[in-house]
Image (cartoon, rainbow, N blue to C red):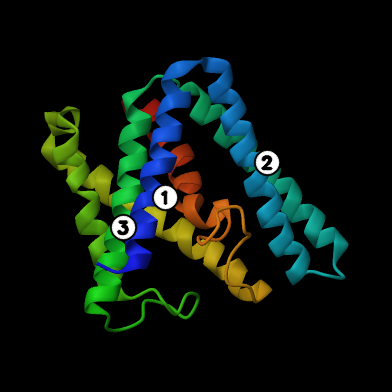
Amino acid sequence: MTLNLLNRILTSIILLIILYIFLFFNKFLWLYLLILISFISFNEFNTLIKKIYKKKIKISKFYNFLSLIYLFFFIYAAYDYYKSLSLLIILSVCILSDTGGYLFGKSIGGKKLTKISPNKTISGSIGSFLCSLFTIIIFDSLQQDIFVSIFLCLFLSLICQLGDLFISYYKRKAKVKDTGSFLPGHGGLLDRIDGFIFVLPIAFVLEKLFL
């Protein structure tokens, strides 16, 4: 197990503990954490956009407007999950998907998944899907309908990977490795939670529509 993988796992555990404390401790602290996460993520994404569209102010403002709208919805959805087991399940899918992708990608390697992110491989993507299924074992509540549970884990893993690729695309266009330096040795906050930010609102909509 490489040092980089250990760092990723350690960071995920620390973020999970922080999230758990705020999620079940106080509703206003939970809201404050969501606003803080969104504020940092917005600034990091805005920095990427500024580097890409240096002289195109109108385009930059348009991106800022869309990202603000999206993050407001993210805050609303996440706030609705206060003291909810569903949020821990969603977060677990994202963490397992991210860890599995890195582990399989580095161990097996092979054909590149896309030019957007040269480090992403097909084996890593498969590893993300497979490892996300461990969520079913961790949370017995998912086993009420095993086929639905498998579909949800795989679907959320897909969204998580697409979210990662989305941010990777803009990092590539901005010609930077990380979205920021908020997490020493790991890059920006958005580097670590890009998949989660995309997964949570979609999971929220699915839960409201079908569950």
Q: Is residue 138 left or right of 96 when viewed as pictured?
A: left
Residue at horizontal 39 percent and vertical 38 percent from the top: 16
Separation of disc 1 and disc 3 at Cα? 11 Å
For marks 1 and 2 on the same chain, the one whose residue lies earlier in the sequence:
1
Residue at horizontal 38 percent and vertical 31 percent from the top: 87
Mark in front: 1 vs 3:
1
For marks 1 and 3 on the same chain, the one whose residue lies earlier in the sequence:
1
Q: Is residue 82 left or right of 122 when viewed as pictured?
A: right
Badge number at residue 39: 2
Q: Residues within 10 Å of mark 2 (few under 14, many from 20)?
A: some
Query: Where does the image place residue 189, in percent across and percent down from the top left?
Result: 56, 51
**Residue position marked by numbered label 3 in the rendering:** 99
Helix or strand or loop: what does disc 3 sit on? helix
Residue at horizontal 30 percent and vertical 84 percent from the top: 111
Q: Specify the amino acid type for callout 2.
A: Phe
Is label 1 in contact with label 2 (beta carbons under 8 Å)?
no
Residue 156 in view: no
The residue lying toward the viewer, choosing from 207 and 18, is: 18
For marks 3 and 2 on the same chain, the one whose residue lies earlier in the sequence:
2
Q: Is residue 211 left or right of 138 when viewed as pictured?
A: right
Q: Residues within 10 Å of mark 3 (few under 14, many from 20)?
A: many
Q: Residue furthest bottom?
A: 111
Helix or strand or loop: what does disc 2 sit on? helix
Residue 52 in view: yes
**Residue position marked by numbered label 1 in the rendering:** 11
The residue lying toward the viewer, choosing from 144 and 164, is: 164
Query: Where does the image place residue 77, in percent across and percent down from the top left?
Result: 51, 29
Q: Specify the amino acid type for callout 3.
A: Thr
Quadrant for residue 48, please give it: bottom right
Q: Is residue 71 left or right of 30 when viewed as pictured?
A: right
Helix or strand or loop: what does disc 1 sit on? helix
Residue at horizontal 64 percent and vertical 74 percent from the top: 173
